[in-house]
Image (cartoon, helix red, strand yellow):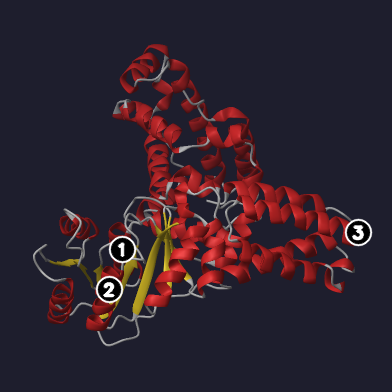
Amino acid sequence: MFDSLSERLSSTVQRLRGKGRLTEANIREALREVRIALLEADVALPVVQALIQRVQAKALGQEVLRSLTPGQALVKVVRDELTAVMGTANSDLNLAAAPPAVVLMAGLQGAGKTTTAAKLARFLKERRRKKVMLVSCDVYRPAAIEQLRTLAEQVGVLFHPSTGEQQPVAIARAALDAARKNFADVLIVDTAGRLHVDQAMMDEIKGLHEAVAPVETLFVVDAMTGQDAATTAKAFSEALPLTGVVLTKTDGDARGGAALSVRYVTGRPIKFIGISEKPDGLEPFHPDRIAQRILGMGDVLSLVEQVEQSVDQEKQRKLAEKVIKGKRFDLNDMKDQLEQMVNMGGMASLIEKLPGASGMSEQLKSKVNDREVHRMIAIIGSMTKGERRHPNVLNGSRRARVARGSGMQPADVNRLLKQYQQMEKMMSKLGSGGMKGLMRQMSGAMRQMGGGGFMPRR
């Protein structure tokens, strides 16, 4: 998300960052570029106008023009105003109610409510240690109830069964009773998709809201609809007392207009964003971190949280002990690291959170992708246990066999082994206590990867 916007804004502010002095003329020129970038990102026009006016008022003030580093001061102003437009800080779910706290999901057809309901259940179960129950009140879409049942099993939460012959309000009331009997902390109610112009369907969801009295009413909207997302969210907020918004399919949205528009247009905070189709593909929305990401400053805090939640801590502990004891880092260890990288959302998810990622060339971004990581895992998977433990035995004939077994070329195997050797050197430096040497090795390896160390795409 934000790829095109981030690229334009980053290049604009970068030109100003190094200037020793800013004038009204070059600030106005920069803000014209920012305005065009926001409009191209499909940000709603009222949001663009308000944002530019606020940035201009501060940028032309003494705070920036008389700053020792005016370029950096202007970047800070742009970052702060982007953050303010999106809501300043993360707005958490309010579950402070007598159990079960009810969360009602509303939205248009095809927005991803059902998958989002399951992702939210998983989030609450794993990160908040809540006992969660899911129920579907979608009696219109074929197999909607069965879909949610399957997802509930996948994420390991309770599910209240229902049928297409039942009335949605009756389903919701029965689920609320079942949640109480099962001592569930949270009941998530999935509803049928509806258009805000369909009065009968809007009356139905109002009846559902009245029947279960939710503590949270979340509007689920597809980020790829751009500024239309803000328009439909506003229409729903006039019919229902929405408490927040969930943006879905942000991994397919390169513009980011919805994220920058929804809060300003509706007055309702964005609470979560869907970052992938996986069950764990839901993240709390942090406006400050998103603003930094848009400006190419990275999002290191989210990256650290992602690592803490996704990495197998026990495996990492064993690897650290192994390296510190001077034992050799082998291809089994490398395979484990690659698999954990995939579990963290893949290379693209990690790289976009690194400072300066927006300045990477498209050619380099295309090389650093999950496809190549999966191919590296496949190559290691085609080796015998002995070859993984002792890579030195991989002579020409063995490499040719591994290449055939993984569907690759011997050159691909050679590149993998070269990368393994670089990682093995890093680990040996760490084991011998040479942290400075390790950092130099890592820096060199990253430069090589940037220069084409990863296997080229086919």
Closer to the N terminus: mark 3 or mark 2? 3
Q: Which mark is residue 259?
A: none
Of residues 312 and 89, the one nearer the viewer is 89
Say what amino acid the circle numbered 1 marks.
Arg
232 vs 413: above or below: below
State the residue position of label 1.
194
Label 1 to label 2: alpha-carbon separation? 9 Å
Disc 1 vs disc 2: Cβ atoms closer than 8 Å? yes
Label 3 to label 2: alpha-carbon separation? 57 Å
Residue 308 as seen in the image, left or right of residue 137:
right
Query: At 50% across and 44% down in the image, what residue appears?
Result: 348
State the residue position of label 2.
205
Q: Where residue 265 appears, x then y in whole percent?
A: 54, 70
Question: Closer to the camera: disc 3 or disc 2?
Answer: 2
Residue 86 as seen in the image, left or right of residue 7:
left
Query: At 39% across and 51% down in the image, what residue appears?
Result: 276
Query: At 19% across and 60% down in the image, what residue appears?
Result: 140
**Mark 3 residue element:** loop
Query: At 60% across and 32% down in the image, what residue appears?
Result: 363
Say what amino acid the circle numbered 2 marks.
Ile
Of residues 44 and 183, the one nearer the viewer is 44
Closer to the N terminus: mark 3 or mark 1? 3
Q: Which mark is residue 21?
A: 3
Q: Quadrant of residue 235?
A: bottom left
Disc 3 vs disc 1: Cβ atoms closer than 8 Å? no
